[in-house]
Image (tube, rainbow, N blue to C red):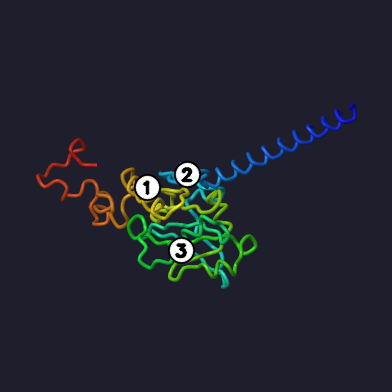
Amino acid sequence: MTVLVVLLGVAVGLLTVLVFGLLRTHADILRALDRAGIPLDETTATHAAVAVGPRPMGPGTSGGVIDITGTVPGGGPVKVAFDGHHHTLLAFLSSGCRTCQTFWEAFTDPEIELPGVDTRLVIVAQDPAHDSESRLAELAPTGIRMVCSSATWQSLDVPGSPYFVMVDGASRTVIGSGTATGWDQVKNLLTQAVHDSAMTGTRPHGVPSVNDALSGAGIGPGHPSLYPDGTDTDDEAPS
C-alpha cells in the first residue's frame, strides 16, 4: 500500500511538471504570434493592426529609410531606391507562411489596386539562408519587384510575416505599417494612413508648398511683385 502511494505521488509530480511545461510553451507561442501580428481567434482575425504616422527607424537609418539591397530569387544582386515620386508599399512575405498565401495570390492580379497615389509594390523576402529560394521564385508574381533582403527586415524592425510598411518617397519616412489577414484590410488601412499623413504635413507627391513655388519663381521676401501698392514695410511684408 505504501509503495502504491509513493508511486502515485511520483506520477502526480511528473504530471504537474509536464502540465506546467506545456502551459509555459503555449504562452511562449502565443506571445510570439502576438508579436508577429498573427490573429489568435475569430474575433481578432477580422481586424488588421496598422500603425499610422511616421515612426523612428532602426539603427543606421537616422536619415530616413535606406535603399533596399539584396538579391532576386534565383538571380543576381538588385537595389531598390526610394525617390520623391512614389509611395512604396513593402510587403514582407515568406514562402512557408500560411497567411502569406493570401497575399501571394492577391498580388498575381495585374489589376490590383494599391493604396495611395502613384504607389509601387515591392515584395521583400528573407535571404536564401532563411527562406526557400526556389519556392520564392515560384511564388514571385509577374510584373512585381521582389528582393531577398534580411537586412531590410532588420532595419525596419519587421516582427514577422505577413507585414506591410508604407514608405513616403519624398521624406523617406514610414507613414503606415502593420499586419492583416487580407488584402482589403491592408489596402483600406494604409490608404487611410496616406491620407492622415498628408493632413499632418506630408503633401501629395508633386505638390509644392507656396513658399517652394515662390522661391522656384525667384520671388522672395521684399520682391516688388509682393507689394503691388508700393508698400514695403516689415509689418506688412508677408512671410
Residue 6 image position (x, y, % from top left): 87, 29
In terms of image quadrants, where is residue 234? Answer: top left
Mark 2 or mark 3: whose residue is earlier in sequence: 2
Classify 10 Å Cα crowding around label 1: few (below 14), some (14-19), many (20 and above).
many
Give whichever of 57, 128 is nearer the camera. Answer: 128
Up the image or down, 64 lies above or below 19; here it is: below
Give whichever of 20, 179 is nearer the camera. Answer: 20
Query: Do the CB atoms of the residues marked 1 and 3 lie less than 8 Å apart?
Result: no
Give whichever of 22, 183 is nearer the camera. Answer: 22
Label 2: which residue?
42
Q: Amino acid at mark 2?
A: Glu
Label 3: which residue?
105
* Rendered residue at 55%/43% (across/down): 34
Residue 100 image position (x, y, % from top left): 51, 57
Up the image or down, 53 lies above or below 128; here it is: above
Q: Secondary structure at mark 3?
A: helix
* Rendered residue at 13%/42% (across/down): 231
Q: Amino acid at mark 3?
A: Glu
**Residue furthest out toward the bottom:** 75
Q: Amino acid at mark 1?
A: Ala
Label 1: which residue?
193
Up the image or down, 31 lies above or below 194; here it is: above
Query: Do the CB atoms of the residues marked 2 and 3 lie less than 8 Å apart?
Result: no
Mark 1 or mark 3: whose residue is earlier in sequence: 3
Distance, label 1 to label 3, CA atoms, is 24 Å
194 left or right, relative to 93: left
